[in-house]
Image (tube, grey):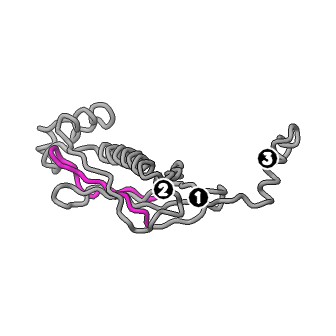
Amino acid sequence: MTRWFEDITIDEPFPLGSHTFSEEEILAFGREYDPQYFHLDPAAAARSHFGGVIASGWHTVLMGHRKMVDALDAEEVRLRDLGQEPGVSGPSPGVNKMEFKAPVRPGDTVTYTLTVTGKRPSNSIPGWGLLFNSLDAVNQHGEKVYHAELVGFSKLRDYRMPPHLRVLEALTKIPGLGKLLTQRS
């Protein structure tokens, strides 16, 4: 999130926006990244149990990721416009779960929502916290088409490095000694 770790509320849905998938877009994505007949050939897909061409799951994921990045950027702008300093988002250490619940078809409008379901300070990276997130996507009929459980880092606003870590950090900046201290045995 583009909010400080301390300011993030658990279980508060954060709307990311919607995307309407066109048949042309589905076919283009399929040709480029996932060339399977049910993403490429409407006639063959219609004869299959899919009942027509469907979007690649990766297409669904990537549109949601783009919506998430855009929404977080907009949140940063919103906070700055209010005179607030936005938090610092970090990378994701991984995805714990990813489910494609229903196919996305041409004409479907998919709405994405991010919800922080839990958080804790990082045990390995001082000054950062971990956010446990649920990313959900529903089509225009309210049917869930995608669900993922993601983890991401968020900077702690009020973090103060403990004295013993400040000393270690200072020691690593001394030429020669820093290299010795940071070598792994």
Q: CA distance from mark 1 to mark 2?
A: 9 Å
Residue 184 screen position, x and y as percent: 79, 47
Residue 87 lies left or right of residue 57; in this view the side is right
Q: Magenta stretch?
A: 96-117
User: Label 1 belongs to which residue?
Assistant: 156
- Amino acid type at circle 2 is Arg
Residue 35 lies left or right of residue 69; in this view the side is left
- Amino acid type at circle 3 is Arg
Q: Residue furthest front?
A: 83
Q: Inspect this view and state whether residue 6 appears.
A: yes
Main secondary structure type of the part rendered in magenta: strand
Which label sits on residue 23? Answer: none
User: Label 2 belongs to which residue?
Assistant: 3
- Amino acid type at circle 1 is Leu
Residue 70 screen position, x and y as percent: 37, 44
Residue 41 lies left or right of residue 31; in this view the side is left
Does the magenta run of residues contain 59? no
Q: Quadrant of residue 175?
A: top right
Q: Secondary structure at mark 2?
A: loop
Q: Secondary structure at mark 1?
A: loop
User: Label 3 belongs to which residue?
Assistant: 184
Residue 168 screen position, x and y as percent: 81, 52
Q: Earlier in the sequence, mark 1 or mark 2?
A: 2
110 vs 8, nearest the viewer: 8
- Frontmost of labels 1 and 3 is 1
